[in-house]
Amino acid sequence: MANLAASGEVCPASEAAMIYVLSLLIGVVAGLRALTAIAAASWAARLGALPVLGTPVQFLGNPVAPWLFSALAIGELVTDQLPRTPSRKAPMPFLARLICGAIAGAAMATRGGNLGLGLLAGALGAFIGTEGGAAARAGLARSFGKDQPAALLEDAVAVGGAVIIAAVAG
């Protein structure tokens, strides 16, 4: 993840910018699938890529946390396919996405950034992901003539994005 200056040393400004970009992007994932972002951050923390010990998000590094959040994320992927699942833009699902984005964004910032700024970047990303994801999915569903292919594509983007973000953070 480190960007190198011409001298071959880590450039602190570039490193900080990358941390907040990752916080924003994991927030976008939370806007698509709230628990996928938390599961990815938890796996990164548990595997030592995110130094969460001694921070408000240290629970993500608990040995049980990645398994629990992964199970919940799989449940979210399944329930999203159900016709009675409420809109992500309804108050409670929207709030859950903002909270998950904020937590995952703060976790990304444990790499050396300010946790408060990571939290805000994650929440902003979740807002963008929620609104943009809903619009993109609606457009894709119209193009496909039904929602399920659009939902599955969104799942793939969320899971793939979360894995890439967690890998880059490490």
Image (cartoon, rainbow, N blue to C red):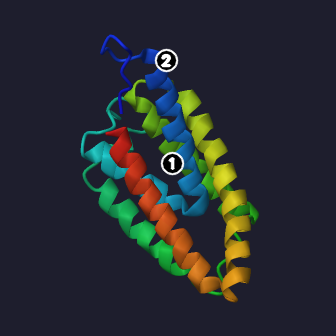
Closest to the observer: 119 or 23?
23
Q: Give percent across and percent down for residue 70.
A: 37, 64
Q: Quadrant of residue 54?
A: top left
Mark seen at residue 126 = none
Q: Earlier in the sequence, mark 1 or mark 2?
A: 2
Q: Residue furthest top?
A: 7
Q: Give percent across and percent down for residue 141.
A: 69, 80
Q: Amino acid at mark 1?
A: Ile
Task: Decide if residue 109 is on the left or right side of residue 28.
Answer: left
Q: Quadrant of the N terminus?
A: top left
Residue 41 visible to an observer of this rendering: no
Q: Residue furthest front?
A: 6
Residue 140 visible to an observer of this rendering: yes
Q: Is residue 25 above or below residue 163?
A: above
Tell me which residue sits at (50%, 64%) in the image. Answer: 157
The residue beneath circle 1 is 26
The residue beneath circle 2 is 13
